[in-house]
Amino acid sequence: MAAERSGTAAKSAGGVQSVGRALDILELIDAAGGRMALVEMSAKSGLPMPTIHRIVRTLVDRSYLRQLPDRRYALGSRLIPLGNSARDVFGSQSSAALASVVDQLGETANLAALDGDLLVYVGQAPSPHAMRMFTQLGEHVHPHCRAAGKALLSQLPDDQVRGILGRVGMPSMTATTITDPDAFVAELATVRAEGIAHDRSEMEDGVVCLAAPVPSATTQLAVSISGPVSRMTDDLQRRAIPVLRTVADRLATELASA
């Protein structure tokens, strides 16, 4: 019923109800892993089947949805260029903020987002060191073994986190990767309490990362730094925490006013 409330809120705030309902359907399908049957859309949204049919038909005609052979519906190809454009905008708007992290800490800074169940990096400022961390922008990766992934998942309810982990899995990347859902949920409780997430060589041996979520009701973003364990000393990590939090607040303000 959350989707129904969303549409009602849009209408009361001066929005168009049909547009709000179409967006609600897209968000429901996204939350369900990218595909959903009509009856499930109706049950989750609280909308009657004739209304669901009209919305879905329009979205299919515009390639925002596509029908699968099993008669379920999946997110369509039209969303891909929109997502790429949004990613580019986030990256360009965050460049100065990420550069300030590098200036203060000397390690590579990243901006990451949740795209469905996976983590995608949308911005980066490289470290000046010859040996530095590099992340492929636009690449979709597992969130459980990365500090930015933990920071983003910490913003979601535990049952939603478990659903994501169940769909994408928790592959072991190193000896320290958390692969048990219960242990991971317990880790997220610590992230929520401290406001900072850690990757202690869980993605790659010898690499340490820290991340902070960007506080926003409309975007799911996290800012992080990563570097070799030899340079990511306890002292640097202590200095990094307030820097990341400050930059996360700055990004929230800048993106909200863009």
Image: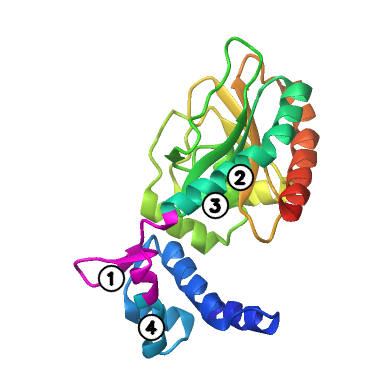
Q: Earlier in the sequence, mark 3 or mark 1?
A: 1
Q: Earlier in the sequence, mark 1 or mark 2?
A: 1
Amino acid type assigned to the residue bearing label 2 in the image: Val
Q: Earlier in the sequence, mark 4 or mark 3?
A: 4
Do labels 2 and 4 touch, CB within 8 Å? Answer: no
Amino acid type assigned to the residue bearing label 1 in the image: Arg
For the residue carrying disc 3, how many other residues have a C-alpha within 10 Å: few (<14), some (14-19), or many (20+)? some
Looking at the image, is 14 positioned above or below residue 31?
A: below
Q: Which residues are magenta?
A: 58-79
In whole angstroms, how far apart are the C-alphas of marks 4 and 1?
15 Å
For the residue carrying disc 1, how many other residues have a C-alpha within 10 Å: few (<14), some (14-19), or many (20+)? some
Residue that badge 1 annotates: 72
Residue that badge 2 annotates: 89
The x and y percentages for residue 239 are: 79, 28
Residue that badge 4 annotates: 54
Mark 4 against mark 3, which lies toward the viewer?
4
Q: Hey, which quadrant is residue 210 in on the image?
A: top right
Q: Which sits in the foreground, 147 or 24?
A: 24
Q: Which residue shows up at 53% across the image and 47% down it?
A: 85
Residue that badge 3 annotates: 185
Amino acid type assigned to the residue bearing label 3 in the image: Val
Mark 3 against mark 1, which lies toward the viewer?
1
Do labels 1 and 2 touch, CB within 8 Å? Answer: no
